[in-house]
Amino acid sequence: MVAGMAAERLFSRQVLRATRPDGSVDLDQLRHLVVACYEDAARDRERTDRAITLMAEELEGANRRLEALVENLRVQNLRFEAALDNMLQGLCLYDRQDRLVVVNRRYHEILGLGRGALRPGISHAEQLSIEQASGLHRGADLQELLATRIALVDGRDGPARAEIFTDDRRRLDVAAQRLASGGCIVTVMDVTAERAAEARAAAAGRLTSLGEMAAGLAHELKQPLTAIALAAANASRAAERGDTSAVLVRLGRIADQAARGGVLIDHLRRFARGGEGGDANATAALPAAVEGALTLIGGALREASIEVALHLPPGLPPVRGDSMALEQVLLNLLANARDALGIRDSGACIGIAARQAEDGRVELDVSDNAGGIPDAVMSRLFQPFVTTKGPDRGTGLGLSICHGLVTSMGGTIEAENGAEGAIFRIALEPALD
């Protein structure tokens, strides 16, 4: 009805346009106007039909593209899930509210959790509660544990790392890093076998070091023995004279020298045995580790006329790591410096300096004035079997072992050439209060 009324109004307008001044209607003009009107309407309908057809084709094409994108996304998601489930590391991804977004199969396996125990959407606190119910974090205050984890991650530009032990004595390497989006990614790796292999290599390295220092250690032990023999002879003569006070003085000297030799032998025994390596919360004091290393190699350095310049400021915090392992690293670096300084006729010097960096880590530098490390070796320095010594002087495993020991303590070791020689820098995390 509305369409009919519109047509009637349109025809009335055409009649008015065809009406002559005298009131009569020019039928030819009226016919022409009506035909033109309907032709225009037909052309409009044709254009409308073409537009509708084009829109339908465009919508169909967009729908096909959308279906292809959905299929591609499905395939990519399957690949992503397959990659996640076949990773060697366990992985958890959190959003900026610390809600779990992604967790893979390997994470469940490493931590001994049932498949699907952790579901995306739970909070980090809920995750810790589920893990504790499965036997992890025994006796831990979960709120305090969560706060400590967040503080460690937020306080670092790079990843924060730590090693923990499970109840079945497996050793896990845990790394966490804050993402630019505000979320966080956590990876867990079972490094039990790796650390066991490193421990065996370290034990072999300790025995090798002791073998290389045999002459110096013999000299260190010969000194108190010589003093004891001399004091005993003097005590014997004093006893023959009946000089009791002189005998007592000599006996005191014998006791002192025996104690000195006992300290060295005890340190040798502890060094050969190595640290326990089973306490992820072990701490070490840098000054004590330096003193222990110098106790073992000090005689060899003095025999080689090498001066040792110490700069250990008071108040250095203890660091995370095993004291014997740290001592072994220092002993190896000092032995390498001694060998490198063998080319100097005089003025040979080794520097040992420590400080606490701005990021809180404790840094220890071991430097020498032997000219530096060749550029061809520098990039491969910590790889196994890389050495600048002859085949009769080194195996090329020492620095590789050092790298493994420092890494296992959550630290880093780097080398560079200074103005006069090589500088090795060890950086370790301060022990938690």
Image (tube, grey):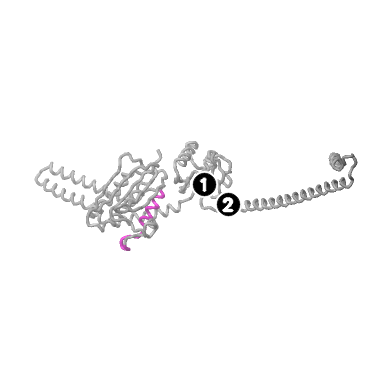
The label nearer to you, 2 versus 1, is 2
Judge left or right: residue 192 versus residue 73. left
Q: Position of residue 284 (x, y in %)?
A: 36, 44
**Of residues 265 and 52, the one drawn nearer to the viewer in this rendering:** 52
Q: Is residue 38 visible?
A: yes
Q: Mark on residue 80?
A: 2
Magenta span includes 227: no
Secondary structure of the residue carrying tag 2 is helix
* Magenta region, residue range: 390-408
Q: Position of residue 283 (x, y in %)?
A: 37, 43
The residue singled out by tag 1 in the image is: 111
**What kind of element bears circle 1?**
helix
Residue 413 at x, y percent in the picture: 38, 50
Three-letter amino acid code at disc 2? Answer: Phe
Residue type of the residue flagged with mark 1:
Leu
Of residues 276 and 153, the one drawn nearer to the viewer in this rendering: 153
